[in-house]
Amino acid sequence: MTEVIMVVLAIIAGAALSVQAAINGQLGARVGVLKSAFLTFSLGALVTMLLILFFESAHPQTLMTVPKWQLAGALFGVPYIIIMVTAVPRVGTAVATVAVILGQLAMSILIDSFGWLDNPEIPLSGNRLAAVVCLAVALGLIYRSNKKGE
């Protein structure tokens, strides 16, 4: 049951990312990509700081004691926000979002298959490859549907 709840929450998080992309795309077109990204990270940092102060429980390690390569994950949000703020006004929220999900799926399957980044190894299967192909086809179809309106 807990796994199902986590999947549902991940779907909700994905939906929220699409709303964020659409809003940030419009904001970036009006005030600039970097200002939009700065606002996203500034407000995100403020909200996260409050959540840490009021809700985070103690952990055996701190940001200063974990392996330093794990801190690099924080840098991956910057290109994501900048690319989405730039892409959404040009290709639409659906194409940009599906393209991101395709990239996420392909890389996550590689990470799982090889156990990269200290993650458990989950073997590559035909079903996993089929999922990538299906998502690539979905991206192509959504992209083509955008072009029919031109």
Image: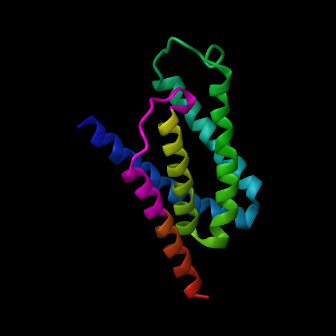
Type of colouring: rainbow
Identify whether 71 is placed above or below 13.
Answer: above
Quadrant location, the C terminus = bottom right
The total of numbered circles placed on residues is 0
- Which residue appears at 49% of the width and 15% of the height? 59
Q: At which x and y percent is residue 103?
A: 57, 53
Q: Is residue 129 magenta?
A: yes
Q: At which x and y percent is residue 65?
A: 63, 13
**Along the line of sight, which residue is nearer the eye, 21 or 121?**
121
Quadrant location, the N terminus = top left
**Along the line of sight, which residue is nearer the eye, 127 or 42?**
127
- Which residue appears at 68% of the width and 21% of the height? 68
Left or right: 2 with respect to 43?
left
Identify whether 76 is placed above or below 27.
Answer: above
Identify whether 137 is placed above or below 146.
Answer: above
Q: Is residue 114 magenta?
A: no
Q: Name the magenta segment's main secondary structure.
A: helix
Q: At which x and y percent is residue 100?
A: 56, 56
**Farthest residue toward the left?**
1
Determine the image quadrant of residue 3. top left
- Which residue appears at 34% of the width and 40% of the height? 6
Q: At which x and y percent is residue 58?
A: 48, 15
**Along the line of sight, which residue is nearer the eye, 13 or 136?**
136
Identify whether 42 is placed above or below 130.
Answer: above
- Which residue appears at 53% of the width and 50% of the height? 106
Determine the image quadrant of residue 134. bottom left
**Along the line of sight, which residue is nearer the eye, 146 or 127?**
127
Q: What is the magenta range?
A: 115-135
